[in-house]
Image (spheres, rainbow, N blue to C red):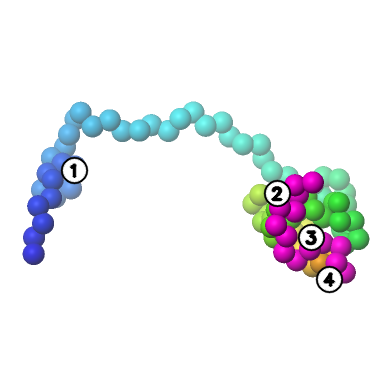
Amino acid sequence: MAFNKPTTGTGPGGKFDPKMKYMTPQNVEPQKKKYCRFKKSGIKYIDYKDEKFLIRFVNDQGKVLPRRLTGTSLKYQRKVATAVKRARHLALLPYVADLLKTK
């Protein structure tokens, strides 16, 4: 069963349309380079009892934010994840929360 296809475009059986306007990307400024705040500040140990500090690395639902958003290095992202898990186990942070940071 053959369907009638429009004959526009540059593909097989198509024609090139010079009137077609292509979108050009807008001038996008490069974002600031992300840095590991632990390396910059010289923090060696992440305290799992400091829930105010750990809440920066958790989103509104209680999930740990990924490295690509926080900018932390792999070594310290693992330490943050472990500290968040320990804080959850001791009920300092919730496992699941609706609108955790709305205070």
Which comes before the other along the chain, label 1 or label 3?
Answer: 1
Location of the N terminus by quadrant is: bottom left
Instruction: Report if the CB atoms under discs 2 and 4 are less than 8 Å apart.
Output: no
Instruction: Write the residue at 56% across / 31% down.
Output: 29
Instruction: Report if the CB atoms under discs 3 and 4 are less than 8 Å apart.
Output: no
Q: Identify the element where label 3 is drawn.
A: helix
Camera-nearest label, 1 or 4: 4
Residue 49 lies in magenta, yes or no? Answer: no
Q: Residue 10: which numbered mark, if any?
A: 1
Query: Which residue is denoted by mark 2 in the rendering?
Result: 71
Relative height, residue 23 to residue 57 (above, below): above
Dot 1 amino acid type:
Thr
Front-most of residues 52 and 8: 52
Residue 99 lies in magenta, yes or no? Answer: yes
Q: Which residues are magenta?
A: 89-103
Disc 2 and disc 1: Cα gap in Å?
43 Å
Disc 1 and disc 3: Cα gap in Å?
52 Å
Disc 3 and disc 4: Cα gap in Å?
14 Å
Q: Identify the element where label 4 is drawn.
A: helix
Q: Identify the element where label 1 is drawn.
A: loop
Q: Identify the element where label 2 is drawn.
A: loop
Query: Which residue is denoted by mark 4 in the rendering?
Result: 89
Disc 2 and disc 3: Cα gap in Å?
12 Å
Front-most of residues 14 and 94: 94
Dot 2 amino acid type:
Gly
> Where does residue 69 sit, x and y in percent of width and height?
66, 49
Dot 4 amino acid type:
His
Local packing at callout 3 (Cα closer than 10 Å; few below 14, some 14-19, many 20+) is many
Camera-nearest label, 1 or 3: 3
Left-right relation of 20 to 51: left
Disc 2 and disc 4: Cα gap in Å?
25 Å
Query: Which residue is denoted by mark 3 in the rendering?
Result: 80
